[in-house]
């Protein structure tokens, strides 16, 4: 199979480094260039030291339309509110795009403004549904046909996968309470008081309680899957981890499920999925998925109609770069697992 040509825009962050690493070893992809506003002219490996000896590419400070020149696909690793400003130029190039920011995940411009703190630069693209939401476990067939994919957020991916079997079964409704624990790499490569190691290494703290920007995309996605009247009460927690997300979700189902039926729902939903597993003899855990594109999910029955669902992912891979490449593989008809099959290390 002939190789496609790819470009990465916004390649100097942690997610960008993971995209580059995976593309360099992809059997069907030639990585043309990496664009960035930082470290211009420096070798890619000067920022991502694990790539020393793997590539001679340098960070190029070029406009998005120039970065996309000759590329079949652009993987966009720009921050929220920046991605949307360059998208019209990228769309004019004819390249297919996988965007890792939150700028095109929603359909409601008002929700975007509420959760991202600014009006959307091109709200008509949200309303029009120009971008397919890139959760393969729900939208695989649409992703295959898509020209533009909005890759889900890390918390969103973990929570959606944890609750998707309940939504698909039509028993997820009303308020769901969630606590999500995340590693520091989710805050990006630039240090801040909240990610400074002496503060983070022995600390747990919440941030954006009940107003995290992933809330509306989770509600939209699970509603699409079959949830009814869904509201999320989501509390994110920063943990002393570099990588990983662990979500605990408390839901009251519309009808009481037996423990056997609950187990069967999760098994049936993820049977044959290449990157989601329901552990047979344990509950999900971060160390089992860190460094890989795998997600682990399961659920336990509580009293009456209470179900507690769990999800674990690597925020930079299944919650970020890996899932974006998974969507890219589907868009171009490649093996969905290409460059993503490694299971990560343990412990």
Image (cartoon, rainbow, N blue to C red):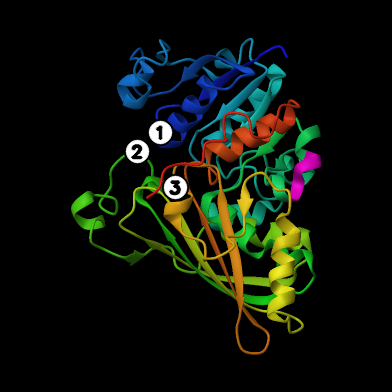
Quarter occupied by residue 23: top right
Q: Which residue is mark 1?
A: 13
Q: Nearer the viewer, residue 157 or 341?
A: 341
Identify the residue shown where x is 43% and y is 16%. Answer: 61
Assess whether residue 291 is covered by the magenta stretch.
Answer: no
Q: Secondary structure at mark 1?
A: loop
- The magenta segment is 138-142
Q: How many marks?
A: 3
Q: Which residue is mark 2?
A: 189
Q: Is residue 278 above or below residue 12?
A: below
Residue projecting furthest to the left? 198
Q: Which residue is mark 3?
A: 290
Residue 79 in view of the camera: yes
Identify the residue shown where x is 67% and y is 47%. Answer: 135
Residue neighbourhood size for the residue with mark 3, other residues' Cα within 10 Å, grouped as few (<14), some (14–19), many (≥20)? many
Q: Nearer the viewer, residue 220 or 112?
A: 220
Identify the residue shown where x is 55% and y is 44%. Answer: 318
The answer to whether the residue labelled 1 contacts the one labelled 3, judged by CB atoms less than 8 Å apart, is no
Image position, residue 248 (x, y; %)? 51, 69
What main secondary structure does the magenta stretch of the protein show? Answer: helix
Mark-to-mark CA distance, 1 and 2: 5 Å
Residue neighbourhood size for the residue with mark 2, other residues' Cα within 10 Å, grouped as few (<14), some (14–19), many (≥20)? few
In-image side of 228 versus 105 (left or right): right
Q: Secondary structure at mark 3?
A: loop
Q: Is residue 24 above or below residue 280?
A: above
Image position, residue 315 (x, y; %)? 48, 48
Q: Nearer the viewer, residue 167 or 88?
A: 167
């Amino acid at each position: 199979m002939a190789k496609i040509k790819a470009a990465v825009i916004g390649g100097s962050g942690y997610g960008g480094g993971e995209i580059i690493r995976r593309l360099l070893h992809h059997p069907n992809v030639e990585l043309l260039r990496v664009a960035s506003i930082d470290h211009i002219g420096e070798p890619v490996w000067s920022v991502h030291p694990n790539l020393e000896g793997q590539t001679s590419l340098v960070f190029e400070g070029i406009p998005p339309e120039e970065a996309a020149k000759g590329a079949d696909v652009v993987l966009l690793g720009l921050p929220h509110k920046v991605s949307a400003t360059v998208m019209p130029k990228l769309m004019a190039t004819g390249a297919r795009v996988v965007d890792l920011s939150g700028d095109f995940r929603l359909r409601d411009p008002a929700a975007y403004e509420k959760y991202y703190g600014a009006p959307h630069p091109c709200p008509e693209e949200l309303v029009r549904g120009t971008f397919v939401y890139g959760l393969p476990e729900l939208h695989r067939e649409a992703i295959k046909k898509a020209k533009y994919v909005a890759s889900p957020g890390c918390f969103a991916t973990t929570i959606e996968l944890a609750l998707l079997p309940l939504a698909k079964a039509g028993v997820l409704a009303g308020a769901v309470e969630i606590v999500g624990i995340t590693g520091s790499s989710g805050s990006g490569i630039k240090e801040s008081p909240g990610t400074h190691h002496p503060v983070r290494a022995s600390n747990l703290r919440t941030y954006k309680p009940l107003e995290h920007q992933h809330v509306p995309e989770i509600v939209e996605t699970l509603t699409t899957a079959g949830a009814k009247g869904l509201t999320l009460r989501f509390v994110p927690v920063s943990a002393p981890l570099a990588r990983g997300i662990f979500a605990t979700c408390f839901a009251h189902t519309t009808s009481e499920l037996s423990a056997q039926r609950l187990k069967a729902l999760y098994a049936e939903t993820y049977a044959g999925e290449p990157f989601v597993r329901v552990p047979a003899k344990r509950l999900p855990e971060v160390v089992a998925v860190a460094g890989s594109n795998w997600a682990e999910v399961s659920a336990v029955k509580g009293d009456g109609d209470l179900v507690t669902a769990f999800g674990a992912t690597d925020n930079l891979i299944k919650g970020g770069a890996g899932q974006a490449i998974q969507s890219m593989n589907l868009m171009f008809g490649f093996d969905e697992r290409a460059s993503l099959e490694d299971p990560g290390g343990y412990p």
